[in-house]
Image: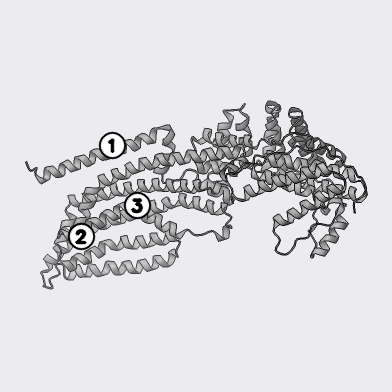
Amino acid sequence: MIMPKSVTAGARVRTAQVVFAVSASAVALLTVLPPTGWMVREQMRGRISGAERFRDVWHSLPVNGADDTDSALSGAAARLPDDLEIQVAAAAQAPQRSPDKSKFETTANLLWEQRARFVKEPAFCAMYLRSAWGASPQVGRDAEQLYSTAATRAEAEAQAKREWNEMRAKPRWKSDPAFAARALEMADQGARLEPDNAVFPFTKAAILFALNRDREAYGALHTAAQCARWEEYVSVEGRGRLRLDAYAYGTQGAMSRVSEAASLLFPQYASLRGAARIAVADAIALEETGDVQRGFQIRHDLFRVGALMRHGSTTNIGALVGIAITGVATARPGGALPIKSRRLETSQQRTARSDHQYTEYLMHIGARDEARWVEQECSLRNRARAIISRMDAGWFSAPELRRLILWWVAGILLLVNAFYLLVGGGIARVIAARHMHREIARLSRPARAAFVTLAAGPLLGGLVNTGAMVMGGDDGTLVVLNIVAGALVVAAPLVWLWRNPTGSGQEHSRAIQRMRFRQGAKIYAMTFGLTTSVLGLIVAVTLHLLQSPLSALVALDMMSGSPVENLPSHAEERMWLALLSLLAPLLTAAVGAVRGRVRGVPAQVGIVRALRQAALPGAALCLVVYGAVALVTLGEERAVWRQIDASIAHEGWYMADLVGDTWPGAVPAPPATTTDTRQPR
């Protein structure tokens, strides 16, 4: 039995409606489920979760909506007053209380107010010391900078020889002396809680150097060298930031998490390196006066602390500072002049020559066990540096993060295409219900061509302007050109329709001309309203759609080392995003036009039919594919989350695993003894 054509068409429509309802229900289910809901809701807004914050952090810009952010974070922290990680993270992200005080001082003051609750926590003491360093002290003396004023290598060597021991300048604690007393108190408290942690005595040594209490500083340095480990508890703040964000805003995506991990600051490291340079300056002075044993003891203690720091720091920057401190400890053994850089010599080769000079010096003074230990640690140090250098800008630039951005963009584009198909299908139904496409088809070919040009003029002009905004063109010039082109496009068809509405070249009565003109004008007005509405929708959606992906791309460019002034414009990516967001409706319209011409009907009739028939099935297909893409995106998100957690736990161990290596461990240090106390020559 042959079914009537209308029945078959009705069955197809009902089937399409059922399929669309099922697919839409599946997406709605993903929206309300906790594991996927946060991601689907973000994609429905056309956003990559955390992309703007990701960009602002790497640009060192204030985060958009900072006041609302501060309020949300402080409110979440107030609900968990006894949670150390949350309170540390809240203090670190608190805004400045006054313009004349640094953000670090605000953080230090907030932590100090909570000392009664957390003072028995070593992590709290370590966090306070980090904030206090950022708020006040600066360790450094004028003669420490060997080449600051030298114009030539010869002048630099002479200056180093002359000024290295001129280290007794005024105290260098720059602001409120109360910070020094508080910092010393926290360092002592941390040392009591964890006597085997070198962080607290070495930080105390740096503070004492800043106060010109050098004798006490060397005692603290020696105590640090006797410790077995280095633990700054940076991961406490890192985990606290992630948890605080989750309490304040709900589940956050990988971009936001990377932003939090990248926001960790380490103001203490500059001062720790300054303290190391001051100590080595004194060691050189002692060696030049013949007191080899005391100078050697200082170098041994400093090298040991640097080795502990290299192995125990949970961040790459901490490991690199430890490596730098071991390099400082080996500088100018016995008062020798600095190592000269040779032509075409790499930094690794220069470091190797410096290490060899120091081990030769140790052998000369009889510290053979020390020399073997230094050689072993230098080998491990070089391995650690190679692992870090192989990761370019760090694990943030790993392929997983870039792939995650592509999955987010794919999901957003599928939702946008489904939306455009539904809008196009609705417009096609309105046109079909009013038979506008058939009335256009009845016009003569010249009149129809003029009408199509007239109706499409505003849409084409608007698309040109949209393309200019997407590609970053000169908007002012393009607007003027579009006004002129639009006037010509509108004027020419109006004159044609008025003078020759049928295209036959025959004269008609004025009444017939007016009637046909009113019919054409009515069709034009409705079509013009639809095209301009669609244009406004396309412009708004396209410009909104570009924001998050471009923010993420800009942040990735920053992480790869591109300076702000030379960042790429990403014009090609802008163009592809704009085109792909309209791919489904444009493809449907093109197929409908070709199909209509093949069947002998006008192109506009074929387009209306194609959009009306394909809207629901096409949107359903987009939603089904989106569901699969959303699940893959969630898997990629969780993979990056695991990377972030592993990196916060110990960045060096994680990066070594990425490159197929193991993070070099620590080597037990021998006693600091020599068998020859004569002045080496």
- Which residue is pictured at 31% across the width and 49% down the height? 420
Residue linked to disc 2: 603
> Where does residue 62 sit, x and y in percent of width and height?
58, 48
> Where does residue 200 sit, x and y in percent of width and height?
75, 35
Indicate the quadrant where residue 676 lies: top right
How many numbered discs, if any?
3
Between residue 45 and residue 618, name the one nearer to us. 618
**Eyeballing the image, is 447 above or below 254?**
below
Q: Disc 3 on helix, strand or loop?
A: helix
**The C terminus, quarter of image:** bottom right
* Residue neighbourhood size for the residue with mark 2, other residues' Cα within 10 Å, grouped as few (<14), some (14–19), many (≥20): many
Q: Earlier in the sequence, mark 3 or mark 2?
A: 3
Residue linked to disc 3: 537
Q: Earlier in the sequence, mark 2 or mark 1?
A: 1
Q: Which amino acid lies under the numbered mark 2 shown in the image of this protein?
A: Ala
Between residue 139 and residue 71, name the one nearer to us. 139
- Which residue is pictured at 54% across the width and 36% down the height? 245
* Residue neighbourhood size for the residue with mark 3, other residues' Cα within 10 Å, grouped as few (<14), some (14–19), many (≥20): few
Front position among marks 3 and 2 = 2
Residue linked to disc 1: 22
Question: Is residue 212 visible from the viewing direction of this image?
Answer: no
Front position among marks 2 and 1 = 1
**Eyeballing the image, is 118 above or below 322?**
above
Q: CA distance from mark 3 to mark 2?
A: 24 Å
Question: Is residue 376 visible from the viewing direction of this image?
Answer: yes
Q: Is residue 465 left or right of residue 496?
A: right
Between residue 429 and residue 352, name the one nearer to us. 352
Q: CA distance from mark 2 to mark 1?
A: 32 Å
Q: Which amino acid lies under the numbered mark 3 shown in the image of this protein?
A: Leu
Q: Is residue 488 left or right of residue 285?
A: left
